Amino acid sequence: MHEHPWKTPRTLLILMSVAMPVAFSTWSALLNNFVIERAAFTGVEIGILQSLREVPGFLAFTTVFVLLVVREQPFAVIALAILGAGVALAGFFPTPIGLYCTTVLMSAGFHYFEVLKQSLALQWFRKEEAPQAFGKLISIGAITSLVVYAALWCLLELLHLDYVWIFALGGGVCVGLALFMWLGFPNFKAEYEQTTELVLRKRYWLYYALQFLSGARRQIFVVFAAFLMVEKFGYSASQVALLFLINYLFNWVFAERIGGLIGRIGERKALTIEYLGLIVVFVAYAYVENPYIGAALYVVDHMFFALAIAMSTYFQKIASPGDIASSAGVSFTINHIAAIVVPAALGLVWMVSTAAVFLIGAGFAVCSLLLSQNIPARPVEGNEVNWGRVEAAG
């Protein structure tokens, strides 16, 4: 098994970074048209579907219990296969209940995979190379999504292929890649044995707080920024798709460089840049009247996502090596607490004032900015924060 020099943890992570967006970008791109045209969805059903989609993210802490019976690497590959299966089956069940079930299946695979990929990457990459390596994985995912969007356009516009078969194709490719990873790669041994119990340590409090606020801001971007483009500026589906393409193009070109920048300037400065930028972007969203400026804000907003690599590398530096797998699941759950609450709560605010929603987002960014100043210049285990330090046993 080991005589092939390409069979490395890095190659496996690259393949994983290709397989996931093949399925997920297919699902994301087709979902809204499919549920309206084939399942007669209204706002009620799509709201239920999106809430159900977030539930597996909220339950990400259960990863640690599955690790009692399955090791991380095979579990990540199984999760990819589940994601692919959920997407492949979606087109065959064009009813509300059928789509709820395939969405939960897809989402369970997606969220477990994201937790495990982050955990494996934090364990397999050395601390000094991690920021740039994370950036490279984001770049690979972005170029894969670009290729998928181009392929979808060809399949829909030129070949007039039915949704059912496009879902099956996108999900099937993901399942096929997962099978290749299962059969083609050895099981790589982790340097440190991972804790198989739920880890929630007081000394990681700053990381948890930054994760919670990140989840709240992400929902404002995902739910309301895109909605603003359509409701206020009348962007068509193809124009929104073009914005997505520009976002992925920027990620492909800049994510690895942004990762390298984080490695050079450190996590505190990187997060300071991100949060200052997001404050400006959210305030601008609140008052923008020009559709082109709105689109530019949407692209700039998305670019700041790559700077969030700094949160992961900060945690890598302060964590006990055996805590990484369990903590990845816990942090995903904390991140998704906001995903359950924010869309519904701010949806009510939106009915009164769209500007208020984005000013609340700016408030979240201000809180994040203040907290990020608590990251030490050289974070390590035992030196997690500048103030509010907790004993290592906590």
Image (cartoon, rainbow, N blue to C red):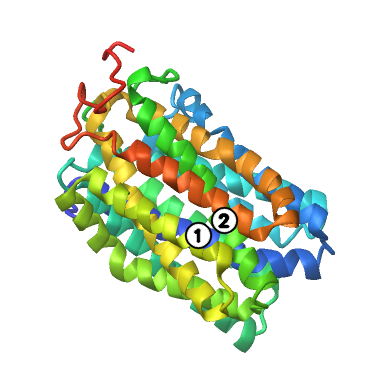
The answer to whether 314 appears left or right of 164 in the picture is: left
Q: From the viewer's perspective, is residue 82 above or below residue 67?
A: below
Q: Secondary structure at mark 2?
A: helix
Q: From the viewer's perspective, is residue 107 above or below residue 224?
A: above
Q: Nearer the viewer, residue 79 or 325?
A: 325
> Where, quadrant-wise, is the N terminus in this rendering?
top left
Dot 1: within a 10 Å radius of its alpha carbon, few (fewer than 14), some, or many (20 or more) residues? some
Residue beneath the point at 49% across and 23% down: 65
Q: Is residue 55 visible?
A: yes
Residues under numbered marks 2 and 1 in contact, where contact means CB atoms less than 8 Å apart: yes
Q: From the viewer's perspective, is residue 236 above or below residue 212?
A: below
Q: Is residue 26 visible?
A: no
Q: Secondary structure at mark 1?
A: helix
Residue for badge 1: 283
Q: Quadrant of residue 159?
A: bottom right
Residue beneath the point at 73% across and 67% down: 34
Q: Nearer the viewer, residue 386 or 50?
A: 386
The answer to whether 138 appears left or right of 316 in the picture is: right
Q: Earlier in the sequence, mark 2 or mark 1?
A: 1
Residue for badge 2: 358
